[in-house]
Amino acid sequence: MRKKAGNRARRRKKTRINIARLTVFLAICVVLAGVGIFALVKLMPSQEAVPASAVPEETQASTITIGNAGDVIIHSPFLKSSTYKKDGDYDFSPAFTYVKDLYESYDFMTINLETTLPGKEAGYSGYPMFKSPDSLASALTANGTDLLLLANNHIYDSGSSGFLRTSQYLAEQGILYTGARHSDEEKKYLIHEIEGIDIGFVNYVYETPRSDDLKGINGNPMDSSVAPYLNSFDPNDREAFYAEMEENVAAMEADGAEFIIAYLHWGNEYQLEETDWQREMAQRLCDMGVDAIIGGHPHVVQPVDVFTSDDGENTMFCAFSVGNQLSNQRREFVSLSTGHTEDGLIVSLEITKDKKGDVSLTGAECVPTWVYKSNSGPTYYVLPLNDMGNLESVTGLSGINSQVQSSYDRTNAIIGEGMEKVKAAYGF
């Protein structure tokens, strides 16, 4: 019995020892845990210690619209018209009376200024050598235009002095322009912020054959001192143009451009379809990352289309020609008697930046236009055909419905299929 009693006593003693050891062990663990937690807390930075730069900021989402119209050409009848003469000078604002609201509805509006501004002393003239009053630029900006495109085949019509003065005058007036410049400090492109989105604009015109190794524009050799100030390309040496455009695209992106639009003065006059070399150029620019092309020069509307880069990474909108916006190229005066030279197109591009900062084309709309002319004056109006049913009542121009409808039908027959293709490609 003792033996058993002694064994129980030893077990109780051992148990007490084990309990004591466990108590000490647990106490140590608690202490260590406390120290660990304290150390962990000390090691963890507080929220106040996180630098602001380390917290990702959400980009402000934004959507803008950029309107794009074609050639504005001041032929001789405009200069002779009593409608546009004012106080010994000219005011061309009346020509834009009925399209002003549409221009101003866009966040940004571009137009091709197919003339020169050499100054009153140089004299004014129409075709074939266009020299227009400074007030033309003022009228365009007063009626909603934000950017004037200068790289066209008539920009050298008044020689070197008129060429330089055109961009100089616009700069002095604070009017945005691109395609031609007057100093080495100016870039070949324009980057402009519109509602928080940096848009890159670049404008080029085709060259004609050289004379005495001088750059030819519309058959006129450019003085070598000013030739570098015009963005131009030789259609027969397109590889040189591609190399230059690759440099432009890289430079624009480095300067912050988030969406790039190329304005090309190209193609064949009075032809209702683009050429094979235009399609080649469009594809190459798409491969470079250009987001949209707006074309001009043929004086008629040509098709719109959509291109995909060879690597499948880029989709590009292309309007091969948006036709004339304002001119006297009536069917009775040109070789094309179908009325297409009286038609134009305003292409609106909707561009969106999402909260992640990604920028893309989210919409495209084409508004056909028609140039009305009356013999009184004579008087010209650019008429937008987005509300044809009310056009007569809004303008007070009676008897124009059939002409307006014909113009709309001509343009829609050219762009209709392409616009459906564009909408399918972009999903809008």
Image (cartoon, rainbow, N blue to C red):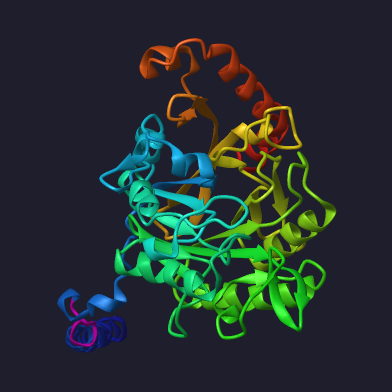
Is residue 245 depicted above or below 262 in this figure? below
The quadrant in which the N terminus is found is bottom left
Image point (38%, 61%), residue name: 120
Total numbered circles: 0
244 in magenta: no
Image point (63%, 58%), residue name: 264
Quadrant hosting residue 421: top right
Q: Looking at the image, which is closer to me, 43 or 141?
A: 141
Image point (58%, 36%), residue name: 344
Question: Could you tell whether 8 is left or right of 385 in the image?
Answer: left
Question: Could you tell whether 178 is left or right of 140 in the image?
Answer: right
Is residue 339 depicted above or below 210 in this figure? above
Is residue 121 depicted above or below 213 in this figure? above
Q: What stretch is highlighted in magenta?
A: 41-46
The percent coordinates of residue 188 (x first, y second) are 52, 74
Q: Looking at the image, which is closer to me, 53 or 97?
A: 97
Question: Could you tell whether 50 is left or right of 310 in the image?
Answer: left
Image point (61%, 62%), residue name: 290
Q: Is residue 273 visible?
A: yes
Q: Looking at the image, which is closer to me, 14 or 362?
A: 362
Quadrant hosting residue 44: bottom left
The percent coordinates of residue 154 (x first, y second) are 59, 60
The percent coordinates of residue 341 (x first, y second) are 65, 36
Question: Could you tell whether 82 is left or right of 151 in the image?
Answer: left
